[in-house]
């Protein structure tokens, strides 16, 4: 920054044919020389301070605009202390404003009167120079703030670029790359291979596949994987980034990678605990539900009306608890990779119809009408039909749950060059803005009066996201609060490609 400003001052003094140029800072009545240039060097130095009232800049600060004095001795300022001390006859200055506050001045002076007088062009030039210097100073301030934030950010911030020929680089990384990958920014600026060499062999193909999928569809990249840590052990990290396609066909991601090893261990312990408890609860709960069902069906004889009501309530709560345990087991299997997936290329429409039929009793109970638009009846995609049906059923049950009785829900498809989208649209309460960021997290439920009392485990959308991710697809939504929501599932039309790990 200093070189740029001093070079600008040198050019300006030559253009204006004046002896001295200064960029000053004015703080609390103190005038400080930050940068200067002299055509004939004197004893002037940077960081020298003067009382503001002893400088011509006090005149400019008073009026806040360009100040031009051609011949100080013949002006009304001839008694000014600065003239008495330095005998500067000509002076041209402009304010430097930063964030609407007077930062200082850019000023030019000479012991010789100005002949001819300063022109309007010269005054405009100095005013524009003041604005340009303000921009440079402000950019430097922002850069310094950003550098401090980056230096204190956990993990590493980075740009990752995948070129059309398959090679990849890290055009930018923060200093945190040394803590994560044990390499420097310079080592990966032209070749990202040193980073991939530190990824666990069992995770390398998964990371490469996820990067290629993100590049092909320009969808956000999110991945957890293990890397070789400083002590030689394997450590869990998590990366997130957003891609953009550049004019040369390469893809550039902007994102971050953080150490989640401790969090991963806690999550594993929690998942193991949930799995153990769920399995231990399932057997006695099944017995209890069966017994209550028999009693509720009067298999053991008629009951008083009050007892019948209590048994019905107990049976409903037991069924709800069963759903919770099943969801807990499903999410645990998905996260641990033990949920079987058998994707193949097959028609999409039959699975949509089957999912709607499976939910028919629930939909009829709430008098919800599902309209299936047969937009692409013959389209095929790459998916596991059982898991797709489970994911779609979650979206349909949510749409019905948060719609008024008697409302309609629309299921439609949209075809893209490499994937198909299945959308479920309702006209219910919509998604609160405060809940959007957490909607696909486990046990997430909107905390508002409009959603309290809606039965659910808070796992349905988390399960749906895991299912779609493992099938090479995705889930997302759009919503206007109070006017309904549209959730959609996206499936690849063909089996996702498996790029080389080096990419």
Image: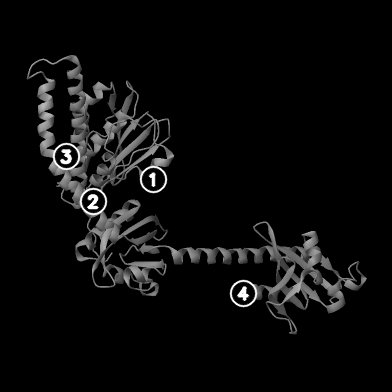
Q: Please name which of the two marks, 1 or 4, marks the residue nearer to the observer.
A: 1
Q: Nearer the viewer, residue 247 or 361?
A: 361
Determine whether 431 is above or below 296 in the image: below
Residue occupying the point 21% across, 24% down = 313
Looking at the rendered structure, the secondary structure element under dot 2 is helix
Residue occupying the point 24% across, 60% down = 499
Decide: few, some or many residues near mark 2? Use Cα within 10 Å; few <14, some 14-19, many ≥20. few
Q: Name the disc covering residue 386, or none.
A: 3
Looking at the rendered structure, the secondary structure element under dot 1 is helix
Q: CA distance from mark 2 to mark 3?
A: 27 Å
* Residue 261: percent from left, percent from top: 28, 61
Q: Which residue is mark 1?
A: 437
Q: Nearer the viewer, residue 115 or 22?
A: 22
Decide: few, some or many residues near mark 3? Use Cα within 10 Å; few <14, some 14-19, many ≥20. some
Disc nearer the start of the sequence (2/1): 2
Give the residue at the far left of this rendering.
300
Q: Which residue is mark 2?
A: 270
Looking at the rendered structure, the secondary structure element under dot 4 is helix
Query: Are dots 1 and 3 in contact, CB under 8 Å?
Result: no
* Residue 485: percent from left, percent from top: 37, 34
Which corner quadrant holds the N terminus? Answer: bottom right
Q: Please name which of the two marks, 2 or 1, marks the residue nearer to the observer.
A: 2
């Amino acid at each position: 920054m200093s070189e740029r400003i001093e070079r600008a001052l040198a050019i300006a003094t030559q253009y204006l044919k004046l002896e001295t140029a200064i960029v000053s800072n004015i703080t609390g009545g103190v005038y400080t020389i930050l940068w200067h240039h002299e055509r004939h060097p004197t004893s002037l130095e940077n960081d020298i301070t003067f009382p503001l009232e002893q400088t011509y800049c006090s005149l400019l600060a008073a009026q806040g605009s360009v100040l031009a004095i051609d011949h100080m001795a013949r002006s009304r300022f001839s008694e000014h202390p600065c003239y008495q001390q330095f005998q500067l006859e000509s002076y041209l200055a402009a304010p430097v404003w930063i964030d609407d506050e007077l930062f200082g001045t850019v000023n030019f002076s000479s012991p010789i009167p100005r002949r001819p007088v300063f022109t309007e062009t010269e005054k405009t030039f100095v005013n524009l120079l003041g604005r340009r210097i303000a921009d440079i100073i402000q950019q430097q301030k922002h850069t310094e703030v950003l550098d401090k934030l980056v230096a204190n950010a956990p993990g590493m911030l980075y740009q990752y670029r995948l070129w059309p020929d398959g090679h990849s680089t890290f055009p930018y990384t923060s200093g945190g790359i040394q803590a994560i990958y044990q390499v420097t920014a310079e080592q990966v600026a032209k070749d990202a291979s040193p980073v991939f060499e530190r990824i666990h062999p069992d995770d390398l193909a998964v990371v490469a596949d996820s990067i290629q999928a993100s590049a092909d569809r320009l969808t956000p990249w999110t991945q957890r994987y293990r890397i070789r840590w400083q002590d030689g052990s394997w450590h869990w990290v998590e990366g997130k980034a957003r891609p953009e396609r550049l004019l040369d066909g390469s893809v550039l991601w902007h994102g971050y990678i953080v150490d989640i090893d401790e969090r991963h261990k806690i999550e594993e312990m929690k998942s193991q605990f949930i799995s153990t408890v769920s399995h231990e609860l399932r057997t006695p709960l099944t017995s209890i539900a069966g017994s209550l069902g028999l009693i509720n069906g009067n298999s053991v004889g008629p009951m008083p009306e009050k007892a019948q009501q209590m048994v019905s309530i107990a049976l409903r709560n037991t069924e709800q608890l069963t759903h919770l345990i099943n969801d807990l087991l499903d999410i645990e299997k998905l996260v641990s990779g033990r949920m079987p997936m058998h994707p193949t290329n097959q028609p999409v429409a039959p699975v949509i119809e089957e999912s709607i039929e499976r939910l028919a009793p629930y939909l009829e109970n709430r008098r919800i009408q599902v309209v299936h638009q047969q937009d692409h009846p013959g389209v095929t995609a790459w998916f596991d039909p059982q898991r797709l049906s489970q994911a779609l059923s979650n979206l349909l049950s949510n749409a019905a749950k948060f719609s008024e009785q008697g409302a309609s829900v629309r299921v439609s498809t949209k075809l893209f060059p490499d994937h198909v989208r299945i959308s479920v649209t309702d006209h219910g309460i919509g998604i609160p803005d405060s809940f959007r960021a957490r909607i696909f997290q486990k046990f997430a439920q909107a905390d508002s009066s409009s959603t309290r009392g809606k039965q659910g485990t808070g796992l349905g959308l988390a399960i749906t996201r895991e299912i779609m991710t493992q099938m090479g697809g995705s889930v997302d939504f759009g919503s206007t609060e109070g006017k309904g929501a549209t959730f959609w599932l996206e499936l690849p039309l063909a089996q996702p490609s498996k790029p080389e790990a080096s990419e």
